[in-house]
Structure formats: structure tokens, C-alpha cells
Amino acid sequence: MSFLKGFLQNLGLQTDEIESAVDQNSAFAKILEALESHPKEEAEYIAALAMMLGNIAYADMEISVNEQEFMHKILRKELDLGEDQAQLVCDIAVQEPVWTGIEISKVWELLNSYCNKEEKRKFMHMAFQIAAFDGINPEESQSLELLSRALGFQRPEYIDFKLEYKEHMTYKQK
């Protein structure tokens, strides 16, 4: 877990949290092992993308099996990821209890540094699609707005994204 330990610490996890997660969660240990087989920047990108999508999907405190399958499908379609990479992203995304110590703003900064405007636009659409899967609630809407700002979108651009998915809002908007 060489570079990944430093990477996770830079995102806010403490050494003991990482070690505890590895010891208590075999799925997490396998994920880290799978990430280690990728080049450093690719592994960081995959992990950051997964944490971003997991943050949005888990904003309502649940990621259902159907939502996971939908996330997998979106990753394959929108990012043209292979089966293994899409599955790895999904596996990471559903490790929410492990990621609770992560400073999500640092994840967003990382994605922001890796991606151009068009990729960021694609991420926003993916995030909205995943949130819309079971209806966008106020918590998901707030997470989407924060993500939008973190990726450098102006408020009118966020409103445009939101309008595209307005039929999926599960609450009255003011």
C-alpha cells in the first residue's frame, strides 16, 4: 500500500484509520491491492472518481444494489471504462463507511486538477444521473451543487444541469 497510503492521508484519512479499515474490511484491502496494480496517476484518478460518485450516491445514506448496477452501466457508457475498471470504481464507491474520514473537497480538487472542462461536464452529468436514479433529494442536491462549484462551474451552469434533471427532484424547490 505504498503510494496509496500517502494518497489517502493527503485526503484526510489518518494512518490508524487506513490500517484499521484494511484489517477489518477484506473488500477494502482487495480494492487497495487492485488500485496498486495501476500506475499512480491512474489509481488516484480512479479512486477520486469513485469517491466523488460514492459521495453523491450515498448522500441519501443508501446505495442500493440497483443503484450500484446503474453506476456501473453509466461508467461503462459515459467514460468507456472496461468491465474491470468500472467494477473497481463501483467497489470503491460503495465503501462509504471507510471514506467518511475523507475530506471530499480534497477529492474534488484532485479531480479538478486531472480533468478538462468537458470531462468535468461529463462528471456532473454522471453525478446527476446517479442521484436521479432513485430521485434527487435535498441532500443529494446540496452535494451536487457543492461538486459543481468545486469543479469550477458557475451558478448559472449548475442551474442548467439541475433543470435537465428537474423531473427527478423529490422535493419542492423554492
Image (cartoon, grey):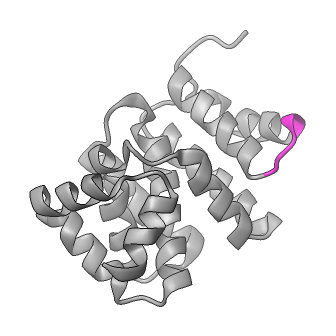
Q: Where is residue 50 drawn, in percent x and y?
A: 45, 61
Q: Quadrant of the C terminus?
A: top right
Front-lying residue, 39 or 119: 39
In percent of the image, x 82 and y 47: which residue is there?
153
Q: Which residues are magenta?
A: 152-156
Whether 15 is among the magenta residues is: no
In percent of the image, x 51 and y 61: which residue is there?
10
Q: How many marks?
A: 0
In the rendered view, tell whether residue 118 sits above or below residue 20: below
Indicate left or right for 156 with 134 as reference. Answer: right
Q: Where is residue 14 drawn, in percent x and y?
A: 36, 53
Q: Where is residue 141 drawn, in percent x and y?
A: 60, 29
In percent of the image, x 85 and y 42: which residue is there?
157
In percent of the image, x 42 and y 57: which residue is there?
71
Main SS class of the magenta portion in the image: loop
Q: Quadrant of the N terminus?
A: bottom left
Indicate left or right for 132 with 27 as reference. Answer: right
